[in-house]
Amino acid sequence: MCDFSLEAVRSRPAKVGDKLTTHAFNWATTGFCASENKGMAVCLLPGTELSFAEEVRRQRMPPWSRDVIKHRTAIFRQINRKVPYTHHDALEFPDGKIVLLTFLEEGQQATVLQLPATHQDESARVPETERAPLVSS
């Protein structure tokens, strides 16, 4: 999913192996773009696992806050979904800390390691007309 503020930006869904870059798409929203196309937002599904090239850095908010998150892996989450007109895209780190994606520094490199499992893989479904009939004895 892409945050509401990226609705006016061209986008595509993430794929395993994608090389992504954190990118400021407008004055208030940082998201992921395709490394080869900075104008294309790459939308992640909740549960997508990412690996960063370096320890993750966040924008320094108050002067006393830490700007380096001591992790290189994260899981994409969406938070506060019932609150409209606010950022929802976030990363959860191995220590349980959750940081809104829009607070990350621009230009960080990440790779999509794994997409979330779905309840039913549509490509693996066999149409009912092609299933073997049940044999009763």
Image: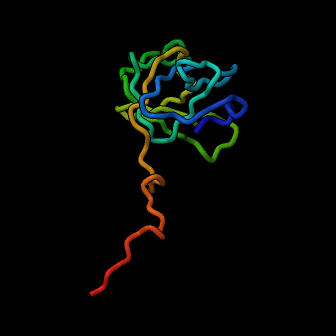
The residue at the far left in this view is: 137
Residue 124 lies, in percent from the top left, at 42, 55
Residue 129 in the image: x percent, y percent?
A: 48, 70
Picture residue at 47% right of the left edge, 69% below the top: 128
Of all residues, the one furthest to the bottom in this rendering is 137
What residue is shown at x 41% (from left), y 69% (from top)? Answer: 131
**11 up-or-down from 134: above or below:** above
Name the image colouring. Answer: rainbow
Choose top left, top right, bottom left or bottom right for residue 36: top right
Image quadrant of residue 22?
A: top right
In the image, farthest residue toward the top: 63
Q: Quadrant of residue 85?
A: top right
Quadrant into which the N terminus falls? top right
**Residue at image point 59% right, 19% down:** 37
Instruction: Tell me if residue 50 comes above or below residue 22 in the rendering.
Output: below
Left or right of residue 127: residue 135:
left
Picture layout, residue 123 above or below residue 23: below
Q: Residue 19: give x, y in percent of width and height.
A: 46, 23
